[in-house]
Structure formats: C-alpha cells, structure tokens
Amino acid sequence: MRPFSRRELLKRFGAGLGSIGLLSTVQQSAMANPLTPKQPPLPAKAKRMIHIFANGGPSHMDTFDPKPALAKYAGQPLPIHLRTERKTGAALPSAFRFSKHGKSGIEISEVFSRVAECADDLCVIRSMHTNVPNHEPSLMMMNCGSDLQVRPSLGSWLTYGLGSENQNLPGFISMCPGGLPIRGAQNWRSAFLPGAYQGTHIDTRETQLDRLIENVKNGLTSRDEQRRQLDLLAAMNRDHQSPRAEDEALESRVQSFELAFRMQMEAADVFDLSKEPAAIREMYGDTLHGRQMLNARRLLERGVRVVQVWHGAGQPWDTHDAVEKNVRKLAGECDQPIAAFLKDLKQRGMLDDTLVVWGGEFGRTPVVELPAFGSNLGSAGRDHNSYGFTVWLAGGGVKGGTVHGATDEFGFRAERDKVHVHDLHATMLHLLGFDHEKFTFRYAGRDFRLTDVEGHVVQQLLA
C-alpha cells in the first residue's frame, strides 16, 4: 500500500471526522424537499398554471383569428410581401365559418365550437410573434425563453420560485402522449436550476399506472426497506458529492429517488380516473385528450404547480398539407376536453387562481405552401409563420372576453399591439407574483432570467 501524502492524510482524516454525523444529516436532508411551498414576492392572481400546447404551430386564421379578406384573393397572389421559410403561392382562405360568441362577441372558428362556449373567459392574443420559423428554436423560445442557449423552462422557473403544494407529486408535470416532442426533455428541463425543478414526463397514451410513470412501483421490497435503502444510497451519494462542490446532476439524482419513493401512493390515486363521477368523465370524453385534461385537473387540484399538456409527440398541428382536413380533425380531438376543463375549473372555483394558456410555437401562412401542392387548394397546406399567430389565456387574473392586438388583414404579420414571447412570459410571471426583471438565478458569473434582457408586462391583458 502506498504511503499517503500529508495533504491526502489531512483530507481523509477530516472526511472521517465529518462522516460521524453524516448519516443523520443525510436522513434529515432526505426529508427536506426543495419543492416546499413558497410565497411569491408580489401579490399574485394565479397560484398554478396549465399550458395546453398545440404542438406544431396551429393555423390562427383557421381557429381564433378570422381573415375574411383572404376570400377576395383566393387562388391569387396577395398584395403584400411575404417573407416565408419556403416558396408559397396563392391566398388560401379558411374553409371554416367564424361566428361571434358570448357577451363579448369574440369570433371563433366552428372547429372550436365547445371552447367558444367559454368565450367570455378567454383573453385572445392575436398579435403574437417570435424570432424563427423553425420548430426547434421556436419550441425552445416558447418553453424556455431562448432559441439559442440552454435555458430553464418556464415550468422549472415557476417551481423554483413557488415550490409545490403537494410534496408527494412532482411540482411540474409534462404530459406528452406517444413519447417525446422535438428536442425531447429540453422542453421541460431545469438546465442550470437545481434538478428538482425539472418537469416529469408522463406518456398519457398509456392508461396503466406502471406504464404512465415508468418504475413508479417497486414490487420486490417493502416501503420500510426502500426507505433504508434510499437513506444508504443518499449517504453514499452525498459522500461522493462532498469533494465535488454542488454537482447538479448528482443532486438531481438524489431528489429523483426521493420523489419516486413518495409518489408510489399518491400517483396511484391521482391517475385513477374511475374515482371521478360518471358525469364528469362523460363531460371530458373517453378519449386520449379527454383523459389528459381530466388528469390535468386532478393534478392541479392536488397541488401540482405546473402542468403542461401536449397535443401529440410529433407535430400534429404542423399542417403542411390538407389543412382543412387536419385542422378539423385536430380541433375535434381537443375541443370538448379543453371546454370541459375550463367549465370544470370554473364550477370548482379553481379558474380564478389557475392560469390557463393555449397555443403553439408559431402560426401558419395565409397562402398555399409550394411546390408540393401547386394550385390544388383542396389538398393545400400552410407553411410556418413566426411573424404573427394567436395564443389565448384564461383564468388566473387575465381579462376574459377580450381580444388583444391584431395581425394584418391577411393574418401574416402582427401589426397592432404586438406581443413577443418574452412579453407573454413577463405577463405570465407577473400573474403568478414575480417581477420578470428581478426573478433571477446566478449562474456562470451572471444573473439569468426567463425573459433574458427583454420583455414587458402587457397590462391590457390583466383584469
């Protein structure tokens, strides 16, 4: 055995003394939960959030932004200059009828007839814009506030700032059926925030608990034995971590073991939809998206801080072809469940303090995408559009029954009261009790925030 150097001997001697109280310290830290509820620094209208993500970029002029002027130019070039990702052709009017709804008279497409029943609760932003007309960077911008750099997601920021009201479930859950979207878990990552604030993915295509949440149950050992194993594992991990400063990956691993242990009982209950009255299950519908939205309500009701509900792991709303057929199908899948969710929250008194957000990463063009479909408008689709699109909010302190901003007469570019994604994030943080300019995390020698160095609160959206 080689002799120890003086430096190594002192290091090992000190580590030996420190390990005397290590086990009790580890057991205490294992009980401590970084998701302990916290009060935001500012008065908050909302205390929880759900983001219903129309993955792929929904066509705003076929859903929530009527553009009758397109009919005048159907099959003809538009009299404006369009900077698009690919070659485009003639104007493509919407195939759907828009009508006014509620006391507010908001115009909504027939494909969202059930959501339209909640028009007076909606705050429709028709002047959204973002930076890049590509899925990957635009997903990162909408979910993480940056289309270039690794950044924490909005859900991670909120759980970092607010914790969670239920210590036995993740503070941030992302429900995406059929696997992972483009860029995978980066859409709900914690990045340089502590790993405990990362979103937990649930594949809601599955209905059995063991498949919904992988490895949620341990059928081989009792809970007492699992607890002893976790305490030993935590002690070993902390010992490994001690000379390595704050290893975020290791910290994330420790917290994930602890959370998985606590979830075993609670998750089995929260995802058991048979405990809901038959009338409620019928209201949502026995479909994939009906189950997703009902699960989302049950999670929020039990104290989960942020839930993100994805419409598909691919880009189902990426309607490059057959836009009429596809938009009708996609809206048909989620119209009833979203409307049921809004009505259910309202009747339970939860809508007032739950911020609801619907939208995708960008919008679509008002013209046919070429050359794949030529002038055949029946099979035509729309290309990506980062210059103008629609997002709507509800509940949580927003001004319901209102329309904010506008795109041009054809729906290509946001023109009046423009709202960038940074502005949307700043407003969402404000509703949840944070000043987006002061809500920061120090990393690599600088203070980072969700909105980078931009964004402002859109006061017109606030009730």
Image (spheres, rainbow, N blue to C red):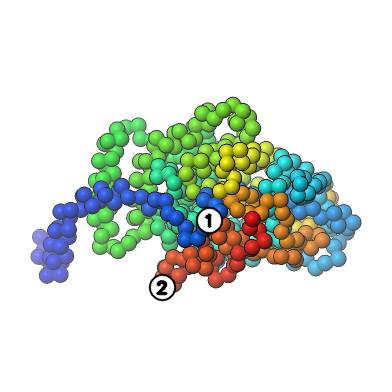
Residue 409, x across and y down, in percent: 82, 61
Residue 238, x across and y down, in percent: 26, 54
Tell me the element at label 2: loop
Q: Which residue is drawn at 45% across and 70% down?
A: 447
Image check: 455 left or right of 202? right
Q: Residue at x 38, y 48 (%)?
A: 256
Mark in front: 1 vs 2: 1
Q: In this view, does 155 lie above or below 283?
A: below
For the N terminus, which image quadrant?
bottom left
Q: In this view, does 60 lie above or below 413?
A: above
**Marked residue nearer the N-terminal end (1 or 2):** 1
Residue 445: numbered disc: 2
Residue 41, x across and y down, in percent: 47, 61
Task: List the single residue furthest toward the top.
Answer: 278
Q: Which amino acid does label 1 sit on?
A: Ala
Q: How crowded is mark 1: few (under 14 residues within 10 Å), some or many (20 or more)?
A: some
Q: Residue at x 52, y 64 (%)?
A: 435
Residue 44: numbered disc: 1
